[in-house]
Amino acid sequence: MAEQAPPSNPLITNKASEAALNVQLHPLVLLTITDYVTRHISRQQKTPIVGAIVGQQNGRNFTLEHAYECKTSLQGDGRLAIDAEWFADRLEQYKDVHKAPALDLVAMFMLGGVEGPAAEHAQLVKRVQEVTASDPAMLLLFHAEMVDQLQGGKLPITLYESVQEQDGGEAETKFRELSFEVETGEAEMIGVDFVATGAGNAMAVQKVEAGGAGEGSSKEKEKKTKGKGKAKDGEDAETNGATSHILSAEDEELIAALTAKVNAIKMLNQRINLIRSYLKTLPDSYLTESTSTEAPPEQTNHTLLRSINAMLSRLPLLAPSTTYTPTPQEPTAASKEKQDVHLTSLLASLTRSISEAQSMGAKFHVVSREKQNKERNTPFGARGGGGRYGGDESILAGESGGF
């Protein structure tokens, strides 16, 4: 007996879109959503997980760039309610910060199942549309149940487009699944790298139970009775043990570099094994087996084989040369670099000496010119201590005294 197909979601429309949307999702949105979900679960909060995503819109092209959590509450009938004033203020703050290029609300994110949106999701989109007085926003559902079952790099999210359909004279909000691309910028790569390297300092803090707290207090009393010296030594040992797990910046950088190299080597090994497994499925080539009469299969990818052959021909260029051994008299790279450093310092000293000699020559020229000008402008009588000019000056002085 054939199994019956599961019922389709009534909130997902079957009508095809007239013009498909081009959506680009940035990793910063995924980091924000996962951080929000992790904190929400670790704190055992009961409120729903709801957030907004801002980005750019250019016609049918959308970008999802930044996300933030929203302030929500549950009404008496169990329906989800959003603080309209808080939501409008926070959205306006994001618009003020991101003005070039201008960002606006483009989507909302919530937790949801793989079967698609539910009634509370449609109510949320409709409520946000009323608050912002704009077109219906897209809906991004995060599937928490798929986190432990990820395969092939598929993200546990689904993006839906909100559409309005007429049903019995009333407009009803429905959804259409959208495809998206992950777009990464330089600033986001720095953020992703920070999150990846920061995980090295993550430490699990165990929760202290009520019984454990009582036992701990009794143990502390016993320690106090043993003497102050032993208690101090125990505290120092605990402090040293707690601080020994903290890595320095150099250790974090070294671990990140080694981790990147290990991942690159693993990926290279996987691809080499994939190429080997593919080549093993092919028959013997007539280039290596002269007695082989079996023709290659019709589905043989000759383009791929030529690429593999070209890659193998370039391997000798990548391998380091082991036949060359420099003689002791031949300068090595270190000695050449040392000579370059000494030559640079000598050139700097020579340039400094030339500059000082030029400065000294200019000063000497100024002093000698001033001395010559002074000798040229000084009267002959003043230099000789008497003479005709001296007599005239005394006569003039006597005449002025007579007056």
Image (cartoon, grey):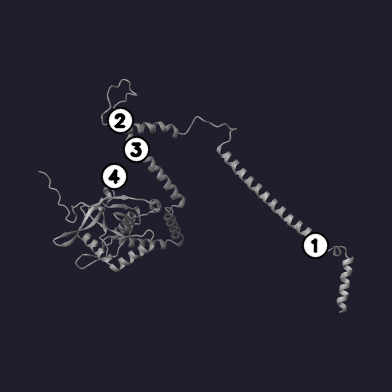
Q: Is residue 392 above or below residue 143?
A: below
Label 3 is placed on what type of residue? Arg
Q: Quadrant of the N terminus?
A: top left
Residue type, mark 2 in image = Lys
Q: Could you tell me how far apart the alpha carbons at marks 3 and 2 are, in whole angstroms?
A: 14 Å
Q: Secondary structure at mark 1?
A: helix
Q: Which mark is residue 271?
A: 3
Distance CA(mark 4)–CA(mark 3)? 15 Å
Q: Nearer the viewer, mark 1 or mark 2?
A: 1
- Residue under label 1, please give it: 377
| Along the line of sight, the residue nearer the viewer: 310 or 325 | 310
The residue to which callout 2 is attached is 280
- C-alpha span from label 4 to label 1: 97 Å
**Residue drawn where x is 35% and y is 31% of the image:** 306
Q: How many numbered markers are drawn?
A: 4
Q: Is residue 39 visible?
A: no
| Residue 357 showing in the rendered view | yes
Q: Earlier in the sequence, mark 4 or mark 2?
A: 4
* Label 4 sits on residue: 152
Say whether disc 1 or disc 2 marks the residue closer to the N-terminus.
2
Q: Do callouts 1 and 2 mark residues in contact (Cβ within 8 Å)? A: no
Q: What amino acid type is highlighted by mark number 4?
A: Gly
* Quarter placement of the C terminus: bottom right
The reply to whether dot 3 and dot 2 touch (C-beta < 8 Å) is no
The first of marks 4 and 3 along the sequence is: 4
Instruction: Label 3: state its secondary structure.
Output: helix
Q: Nearer the viewer, residue 277 or 290?
A: 290
Foreground mark, 1 or 3, reads: 1
* Residue 345 locus on image (x, y percent): 62, 46
Depth check, mark 4 against mark 1: the one in front is 1
